[in-house]
């Protein structure tokens, strides 16, 4: 059978035809790594590239869900179609949350054309970020104009997940020094747009100032050092600036300065400005050529991850065929063999196979 | 050529014959991954298993170097031979430090039979913990009775490194709440012996009590919960207990309760008690059968790591042969192909090769 035949052609056709039920089934297949999911993703890939993918992260309680609801409504009011993937790297559960969240979206946005889907750590062989990337592909191929990837927390796993987006928004709650510390620790580096939500709370202005100062340091780490400003800045600032500079160089070139917007998600205040800030970053990515570069880098990383996971699976089966890892470890412990001899014996045939007998 | 012939037989013979210069050359070869290092390690492995390997970690400034010096002197006074590997996962430099540290050891211990070697993140293809494991093997095959693996810091990389030891000692500086936080964050789980160094400082008794309480929670997480103690414990405590419980179950079974000793490394006070605590853990490992289990688990993990690294190298060369990852990523971005098709095309021949044509 060819790849196309192995993919469920009917499912693909119905998804491309705009059937939400087919979209849901496709994502379930992707999430569960069911038979044929690879061919399914292969069949969807040529139809992708039209969606604007936005990742939204931030510490729990910052108001991500409400803001995502309001942002989705704003897009719908502008006549755009929207898909949302809610990712919880810490939770092994799904299913129940899916229905609950769908109801939430339907009631808040008042229109079923915002397709919401939860994903969790369950069934994420090959990594949650790989599964998320593939689910985004399904929404993209379906024809959604905007795909929002919302994470529950703001740890390293969440960072990996939202990095699969074109534009990353980081939510901060005013007055929480913890958030600023968290940002200094690494999340600053990935934010294209910072949102101070609950902007009606005390301390919002100060949080905005702090973020703007951090962005300034990120953009001008050397100017800061040359001016002897180092002595008065907090110890963490310069380091964050340096790390962020490296990340910025790698990711976006030097062309984009992150913006800070204030919102009150519960009332909807500032959400239009947030949507505009996201659009501005998208326009920057397109006009500067950074989007092409970013997409290529992401595809390269994706190929590497798949290769590693696939090779690991081949090796696991080969280990089983040779009596299992425990027996081999036992032989090493008994000094009958050693780890390098075992590795060579297993990998050498692969090497010869790939590189010929030379 | 056979494996044995590919290994430098003369180097191996001189090392086994007790020549320190050959030991130093072997470790350099291991650290640099020079041609023939795999065969060298294979040739050394049958001669290993005699050394007691102790890992020592803790935050910078806790006094690790001084304590290691004093511990080495204690072992030498008891007529035992000692090798020390100082590991700095954050530093890309080596060489200079080696000489400096050797001089330090020679002058402090007053005898050249404490062989000291620094290792850094330089030339650590395949990971610093792999290189450290192999260097420990060289010292073990050489015939050192005690091998001490000392890390510079106490982060995740250091944890990976010291986990290669049979017994792990964690140093804590009194009165530093940071240390306790750090311990709660994960280092508690790997400590078999805790050392409150600088025990003449204010707050030492309190740090000892805190450690003992944490160990009690680690041993009895359920008792703690059942007694409703949860409400008064600090939020982090129970979590640390639960995590630690899982780790303890996995590593040592339920048979070892970590001990806490107090030392003043600068004066040598408490160092004998520290050495006894380390010996007690070693005796526990041997008499309970946990050492056999632990060694086998470590060898299994080592085989897996080598397989992953070797397969990754084969895949990288295959990617190069196919025009490089950038060209493939470009083709994916242009929708000429997709990541799964690329991965299948590269891995499928490997799979067939290993599993036959079926």
Image (spheres, coloured by chain):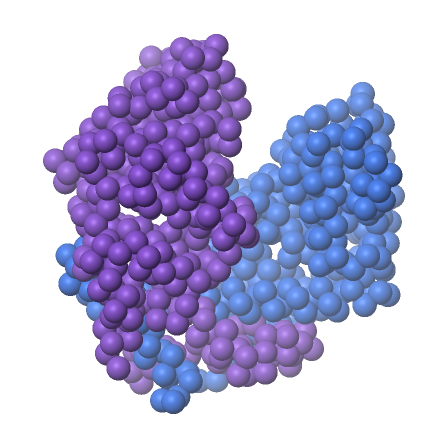
Chain colours: A blue, B purple
Left or right of B249: which side holds A121?
A: right
Quadrant where the N terminus of chain B is found in the figure:
bottom left
Quadrant where the C terminus of chain B is found in the figure:
bottom left
The residue shown at (64%, 79%) is: B327
Q: Quadrant of residue A254?
A: bottom right
Q: Nearer the viewer, residue A14 or A30?
A: A30
One can see residue A303 in this view: yes
The residue shown at (39%, 36%) is: B107
Left or right of A145: which side holds B180?
A: left
Indicate whether B290 appears above or below B177.
below
Indicate whether B78 appears above or below A38.
above
Q: Quadrant of residue B76?
A: top left
Left or right of B147: which side holds B172?
A: right
Q: Position of residue B21 (x, y in %)?
A: 33, 57
Q: Position of residue A133 (x, y in %)?
A: 60, 60
The residue shown at (39%, 23%) is: B265
Q: Position of residue A200 (x, y in %)?
A: 83, 25
Left or right of B238: which side holds B72?
A: left
Q: What is the number of callouts on the image?
A: 0
Q: Position of residue B87 (x, y in %)?
A: 44, 45
Q: Nearer the viewer, residue B145 or A165?
A: B145
């Amino acid at each position: 059978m060819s790849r196309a035949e192995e993919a469920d052609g009917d499912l693909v056709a119905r998804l491309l035809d705009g059937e939400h039920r087919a979209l849901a089934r496709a994502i379930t297949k992707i999430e569960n790594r069911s038979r044929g999911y690879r061919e399914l993703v292969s069949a969807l890939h040529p139809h992708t590239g039209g969606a604007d993918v936005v990742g939204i992260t931030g510490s729990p309680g910052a108001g991500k869900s409400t803001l995502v609801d309001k942002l989705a409504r704003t897009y719908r009011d502008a006549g755009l179609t929207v898909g949302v993937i809610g990712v919880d790297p810490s939770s092994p559960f799904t299913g129940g949350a899916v229905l609950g969240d769908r109801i939430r979206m339907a009631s808040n946005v008042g229109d079923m054309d915002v397709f919401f889907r939860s994903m969790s750590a369950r069934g994420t062989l090959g990594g949650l970020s790989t599964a998320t990337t593939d689910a985004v592909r399904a929404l993209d191929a379906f024809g959604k104009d905007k795909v929002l990837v919302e994470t529950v927390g703001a740890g390293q796993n969440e960072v990996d997940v939202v990095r699969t987006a074109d534009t990353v928004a980081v939510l901060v709650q005013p007055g929480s020094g913890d958030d600023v510390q968290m940002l200094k620790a690494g999340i600053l580096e990935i934010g294209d747009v910072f949102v101070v939500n609950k902007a009606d709370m005390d301390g919002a202005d100060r949080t905005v100032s702090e973020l703007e100062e951090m962005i300034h340091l990120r953009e001008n780490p050397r100017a800061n050092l040359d001016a002897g400003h180092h002595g008065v800045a907090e110890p963490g600032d310069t380091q964050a600036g340096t790390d962020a500079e490296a990340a910025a160089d790698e990711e976006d070139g030097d062309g984009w300065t992150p913006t800070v917007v204030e919102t009150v998600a519960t009332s909807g205040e500032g959400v239009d400005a947030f949507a505009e800030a996201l659009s501005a970053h998208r326009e920057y990515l397109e006009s500067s050529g950074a989007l092409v570069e970013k997409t290529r880098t992401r595809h390269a990383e994706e190929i590497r991850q798949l290769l590693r996971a696939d090779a690991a699976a081949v090796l696991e089966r080969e280990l089983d065929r040779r009596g299992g890892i425990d027996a081999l470890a036992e032989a090493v412990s008994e000094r009958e063999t050693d780890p390098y001899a075992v590795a060579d014996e297993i990998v050498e045939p692969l090497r010869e196979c790939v590189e010929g007998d030379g």
